Image (tube, rainbow, N blue to C red):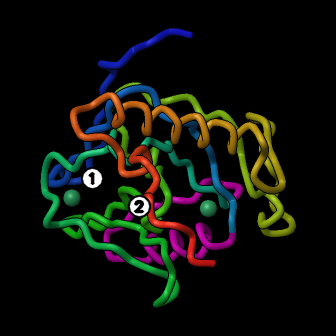
Amino acid sequence: MGKAPDVRHIARCACGEVELEMIGIPIVSVVCHCDDCQTGFLQLETLPGATPILDAACGTPCVLYRNDRVTCTKGAELLEGRKIRERSATSRLVATCCNSAMLMRLDDIRHWTPVYRDRFVGDALALEMRINTQFKPEGIALPADMASHPSIPLRFIARLISARIAMTLAYSAASSPSPCLRPMSTAGCSG
Ligand SMILES: [Zn+2]
Ligand SMILES: [Zn+2]
């Protein structure tokens, strides 16, 4: 497997006030057709000046990175999270300067960050698969441009798991050990 730790990608809002920097190779690049993405991104499309987000088959192209590989390098104060339900753990972040959809922030326990692919500058990263296609509206044809899966395929889950392991190893090799690696407490189990 080739290693390219210094690969960097930039994602920029339409007006250029907000910039994200992604380091390294992404976990996976997908088009998500889930109902939440359809609802959430359709809402962002209706914001003044926003550009279309969903593709012709109502999917959202996203590039997933480890949380520690995505940094907002410019205009972080302009990013605003939108939720489709008040108690939802998922926010879709929009650059309020021009209403460009930028990225998603998931529940704290998740270790990956989806970045909206159409905002990438320069060479577009190849998309690998369509996921959650069971939610695609009826009557809309699915393009045969890549592998498609009705739900979340094992291949996708495997990539997320290996990213989690890589992230844990990276932090355990660093000066401060992960709390997960601390020895067990000597206190007996009360149960
Ligand atoms: Zn902008
Ligand atoms: Zn989705």
Along the horizontal axis of the image, is 75 left or right of 177? left
Mark 2: C-beta under 8 Å from nearest atom of ligand 1? no
Q: Are marks 1 and 2 in contact (CB under 8 Å)?
A: yes
Under 8 Å from ligand 1: the CB of mark 1? Answer: yes
- Which quadrant holds the C terminus? bottom right
Type of the residue with mark 1? Ala
| Disc number placed over residue 121 in the picture, else none | none
Along the horizontal axis of the image, is 11 left or right of 164?
Answer: left
Q: Position of residue 105 (x, y in %)?
A: 41, 63
Image quadrant, ligand 1: bottom left
Residue at horizontal 39%, vertical 14%? 4
Left or right side of 17 for 162: right
SS for callout 1: loop
Q: Secondary structure at mark 2?
A: loop
| Vertical side of 56 occupied by 48: above or below | below
Left or right of 35? Residue 44 is left
Mark seen at residue 14: 1
Mark 1: give few (<14), some (14-19) or many (20+) Cα within 10 Å.
some
**Closer to us: 188 or 62:** 188
Q: Which residues are magenta?
A: 35-57
Q: Residue at x 43, y 42 (%)?
A: 66
How many circles with numbers are drawn on the protein?
2
Residue under pointer 2: 51
Q: Quadrant of residue 1?
A: top right
Between the C-alphas of marks 1 and 2, the distance is 9 Å
Which residue sits at x=51%, y=87%? 85
Q: Amino acid at mark 2?
A: Thr
Q: Position of residue 114 (x, y in %)?
A: 47, 51
